Structure formats: structure tokens, C-alpha cells
Image (spheres, rainbow, N blue to C red):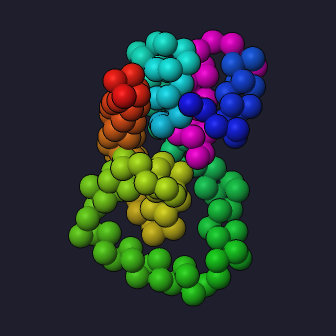
Amino acid sequence: MLDQITQPVLAFLQQFLGNPALVAFALGAMPLFEMSMAAIYVITVAHQPQLILFGTLGNFCAVLALLALWDVLRIQWWGEKILGHRLEKRMQEMAKKHEEYGILGIALFVGIPFPLTGVYTGTLIARILGIPKRQILLGSAIGVCMSTVIAYIGVTAGIKLLLLG
């Protein structure tokens, strides 16, 4: 069930952290893995579905870390250097549309598991758009809860389909 990329990461975390709750937390906090991998781990590997709450906590802590490190790491400056001023101006224009969707837009972007969506991308884009931290936190909290429920249901349903098929 686990592919060639996730198996070594999971093996390292299990050996290094030992405690399944800490592994779920770490998976929830890691970019690319986030809640999908945390759900797979707690249900299929650890066999402790209740540990999904630790993955959820780890995922939300990623938002807090990104917001706290925004100025320290000069993310805005690096973004301008890498993406250029043209893209930044476009993003600023998009910020005006944010008022139309608000916190719900952030929640949906973070919560619905599509490629390149999630708490990292959602938080970074929201900060680039100049959305206030309070709105980012609230939208991300709602999105992380949505993501947890969707990942948990998806993994559970997938396992049931595999067992029945």
C-alpha cells in the first residue's frame, strides 16, 4: 500500500520517534504527506485510528510554524526573487477577490485534497495575498478538520473496497 517514497520516510519516523502518536503528528506536519499519509498510517500501520487527532494537530501546527517563520525566513522576498514581481502583482489582484470568498475559500483550498493544495500551499498563498493572520488561522483550522474527515473516510472506504473486492 505504501510506495517507494513513503516507506523509507515512514520507517525512519517509526525508528526515530518510536511512539505512534508522534509519528502521526510528524506525518500530519510534513509537506506532501499531511493528512492523507497520517490517515493511512494510523489506520493501516499503527492500527490505532484515534491517533488521527495527532495528525490533525501536526497539520495545524504547520500553519502556526509558517506564519511564525514568514518574516524570519523572508518568504515574501524569496517569492519575489523566484517568481518575479509580475506574478506578485497578479496575486495582489487576486487578493481583492478573496473578500468575496473569505475564510471559506481558505478552508476549501486547505481541506479538499487535490494535488498542490493543503495547509502549506494555502497558508503561503494566503500570506502572499495579504490575508490577515487571524483569517488564515481560522480558515486553515476549518480546512484541516475537513481534510482530516475526508482523508479518514477515504482511507477507510478504500480499505473496505479492497477487502470486499
Percent of width and height locating residue 94: 39, 77
Locate the N terminus by quadrant: top right
The answer to whether residue 138 is magenta is no
Q: In this image, 62 relative to 48: left or right?
A: right
Q: Which residue is depicted at the point 54% across and 24% down?
A: 41
Q: Which residue is depicted at the point 70% across and 69% down?
A: 78
Q: In this image, 129 relative to 4: left or right?
A: left
Q: Which residues are magenta?
A: 16-34
Percent of width and height locating residue 86: 57, 87
> Which secondary structure type mostly characterizes the magenta part of the structure?
helix
| Residue 141 showing in the rendered view | no
Percent of width and height locating residue 104: 27, 55
Percent of width and height locating residue 68: 58, 47
| Residue 97 showing in the rendered view | yes
Q: Is residue 163 above or below residue 93?
A: above
Q: In this image, 95 relative to 7: left or right?
A: left
Q: Which residue is depicted at the point 72% across and 24% down?
A: 11
Q: Residue furthest bottom?
A: 86
Q: Which residue is depicted at the point 36% across and 28% down?
A: 165
Front residue of this view, candidates 23 and 74: 23
Q: In this image, 15 relative to 3: left or right?
A: right
Q: Is residue 67 above or below residue 155?
A: below
